[in-house]
Each structure stands twice: as structure tokens, then as C-alpha cells.
Amino acid sequence: MAETVILAYSGGLDTSVAIRWLQETYGLEVITLTIDIGNERDIDAIAAKALRIGAKKALTVDARRDFLDYFVWPALQANALYEGEYPLATALARPLIAKLLVDVARQEGATTVAHGCTGKGNDQVRFDVSIMALAPELKIIAPVREWKMTRDAEIEFAAQHNIPVAATIASPYSTDVNLWGRSIECGILEDPWAAPPRDVWEWTVMPDPPLAPTEVSITFDQGVPVALDGETLGPVELVQRLNQLAGEQGVGRIDHVENRLVGIKSREVYEAPAGMTLIAAHRALESLTLSRDQVRVKEMLAGEYARLIYNGLWYSALHADLMGFMRSSQRYVSGEVRVLLAQGHCTIVGRRSPHSLYQHALATYDRGDTFNHDAALGFIALWGLPVRTQAQVQLLPGHDGSVLPDLAATPRSIAPAPVE
């Protein structure tokens, strides 16, 4: 009896050809798994296509809620942006897909899992390492990485095996889509000097003439968004609605030359209207509810957290440790943030929280000021004591002209204007 492989199936050319290729090359029975994470596709039609090609079984999963709850929201709580730019939409989806592949493999008694990644990108690492961590006993096959067929050869293979292919002409772009963002590469985008053509963008528009600005209020509970304009929404509906509101104002476009895990630089273009808006709002709420040192340390760890996700280490001990810190930091990050969306920009215009550390009586310069100004003298004396002591004992940089030139030029005197 032939062994079974679970194939992560998108319905595109690569994974459609992979069904027959796995059967012919490895003699495996193929069960396809198609996962909805906000890909905006007809999942049932994709499953039916897999069965027509020859899959033994075609399974589908609606994982949109799980994607947001268990993968996106932790990244949002961390304000995770890879290299300060990319909100990690594709990278966050891979550990979820890997987990579902492993779960289905165990349910179906499969010995192997397969995915459609090439040998040049980051996703192969994310899939393989996640699967290794969750089920080290499973074998992993990446047909596209192995067969080394050109696209023309794949199309010819499809024709020979009566595999339905939607189009025989390659799109100039390679795209990946989920609820948290849309990733676009290839074509003219491979020239970092070339501006992205208009046909690259699908979620964001720059209306001409500009639309009137849109203001939206976002409510958070322990760092997780739960309502828009006071209306409580489920995670999927909230992100979908915010994608539309922010996308209509051109918010969320990213043009980034990033450093891939496999060692090359790649120019990527992203659309993440909801993602970039929520991260901006979340940061604004943290500015009220976290102490200065919490913010400082959290900002340092956010970069590590983003790199960990990008590099496919979601199921690592380090991630468990960092997630513990991030979750703890969100205990009081609850409140409301007002955001103005206009002409590609997301601007914070208000924030409030029942746990705010901002105290008006301490901050104000008007009547009601309770800050002890006299205490500042003693604070400055102690704060500056190490610098003063060292300056008295040692010649510090700048005093001898090593850092700054001699600035002791004769000051120019300006006489007062004569009174007539």
C-alpha cells in the first residue's frame, strides 16, 4: 500500500503539477490541504480541482480566526516589523500552515508532508524548520525545489497530464496574500530604481482628487484590537474593515529592500493597510500605559522578535521566552486610540486609557501644576555628579580640541539701536 503525503495546496500551477509529480516520482498517494487565511479565493473550487487532478482526498480549513488570534496578535503586541518596515504577513502565515500540515498528517497517518516553495526564498526555511520542530519524524518534500523545471516546462507537464491551468502566461509578479497583508515581488520590481507600477497595488489607492480624511477609533484590550468606532468586532471582521478603510486612503504601502535569510537582498513591495494602522495605534497606546524603561526594553526586543519570525523560528524556545515578556507587557495596554487616515498617511490624533501613566497635573505648565520644581536641582546634581567628577579629574574628549575645534572666538558685540 502506497504511503501518503499531505500537500499544502494553493491551486496554482506549481502545486497542481506537484500532485501528479509526487505520484509519479515518489509513488505517494496525495492528500491536499487548502487553508483559508484571508486569501480571497474560492476554497471549494480549489479542492474540487485537486480531486480532478488525482488527489486521493482534498481537505480545506478556515484558519482565518486562528491566524489572527495565535500568530498576528502576538506579533502586533510586540510591534514586530522586520528591519523596521515589513509587518511579516507572509512570515506569520507559514508556522500556522506548518502546524496544520502536521496535524492533518497525524490524523491521516501520513509519513510525508510537501509544500510548493522554491530553493531561493525564505518560505522553504520557515516551513521546513517549523515542521522539524513539531514533528521531526515526518519527511519533507519540496517538489519545486527538487524538479528544477522552468515555468514553460511545468505548463508542458500540465498539458501532458491534463492538469487544468488557469493561464499559460506567467504574471509579471509573484504575490502572496492573507488577512495581514499582501506581498509582491518579481517583474520590474527586481530593479530597485524602478518605481512600482500602478498595477502592483490592489488593496491601496491614492485617490485623485484626495478623499476627505477618515477618522477611526480603535479600542484595545491588553494589546489586542477589539472594536472600531465603539463597535465590538470579531478579529476577522475588524481586520477586513480596517483594510478597507485604510486602503481607500492609500495607507499601508511599503517598498522595502530587505535582507533575506538565504543571504541575498530582495526588493519587496507590500500592502498592509490594517497592519500598519494597528501597529501605529498600538504604539500610541503603549506610550500612555508603559513606563519609559518598559518601552525602551520592548523596542530592543521587538527587533529580535521580528527577526525570529522572519527567520522561521516561531516554534523555538527563544520565541516562547520572548512571547512571555511581550504578553506580560500588555497587561495594562487597554484603551482607545483615534487615528486619522489621509493621503497615504496614518496619524495618531488622540489616545486614552484607564491605565494611563500620563498625569495632567504633573505635565501641565498651567495652574494646577503639582510637579516639585525644587526637586529638580537635587536630581540634576546627582545625575550630573559622575560627569562633573570625571571632568574635575580627567581631561575629557572635546576639552583638548580632539572632538570640537576651538570655539573660543571673540564674541561679536551687537549694540542696541539708538533711540531717536
Image (cartoon, rainbow, N blue to C red):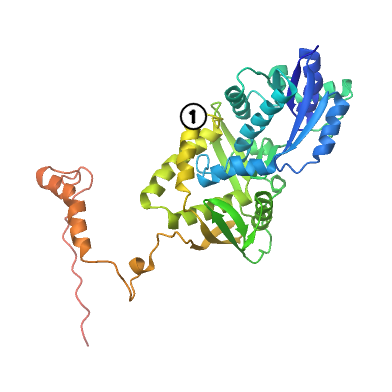
Amino acid at the residue labelled 1? Ala
User: Does the image show residue 194?
Assistant: no
Quadrant location of residue 87? top right
**Residue at figure coordinates x 21%, y 48% from the top left:** 405
Q: How many circles with numbers are drawn on the protein?
A: 1
Which of the image's four quarters has the N terminus?
top right
Expressed as whole percent of the image width and height from the top left, the position of residue 2 reads 79, 13
x then y, percent, for residue 81: 52, 42
Instruction: Indicate whether 380 appears above or below 133.
Output: below
Q: Position of residue 79 (x, y in %)?
A: 51, 46
Element assignment for label 1: helix
On screen, residue 323 versus residue 17, left or right, reads left
Q: Quadrant of residue 10?
A: top right
Judge the density around disc 1: few (<14), some (14-19), many (≥20) Cα neighbours within 10 Å: few
Kindly tell me whether residue 385 is visible in this rendering: yes
Q: Quadrant of residue 394?
A: top left
Q: Is residue 229 left or right of residue 173?
A: left
Image vertical order of residue 96 relative to residue 363, above or below: above
Is 210 or 79 nearer to us in this picture? 79
What residue appears at the point 74 percent right and 25 percent down from the top-left corner? 7
Expressed as whole percent of the image width and height from the top left, the position of residue 176 reads 69, 38
Is 264 rendered above or below residue 286?
above
Drawn side of residue 269 relative to residue 327, left or right: right
Q: Quadrant of the C terminus?
A: bottom left
Residue extending furthest toward the bottom: 420
Name the residue tied to disc 1: 317
Looking at this view, name the residue that lies furthest to the left: 393
At horizontal 18% and vertical 45% (from top left) the residue drawn is 401
Name the residue: 77% across, 27% down. 32
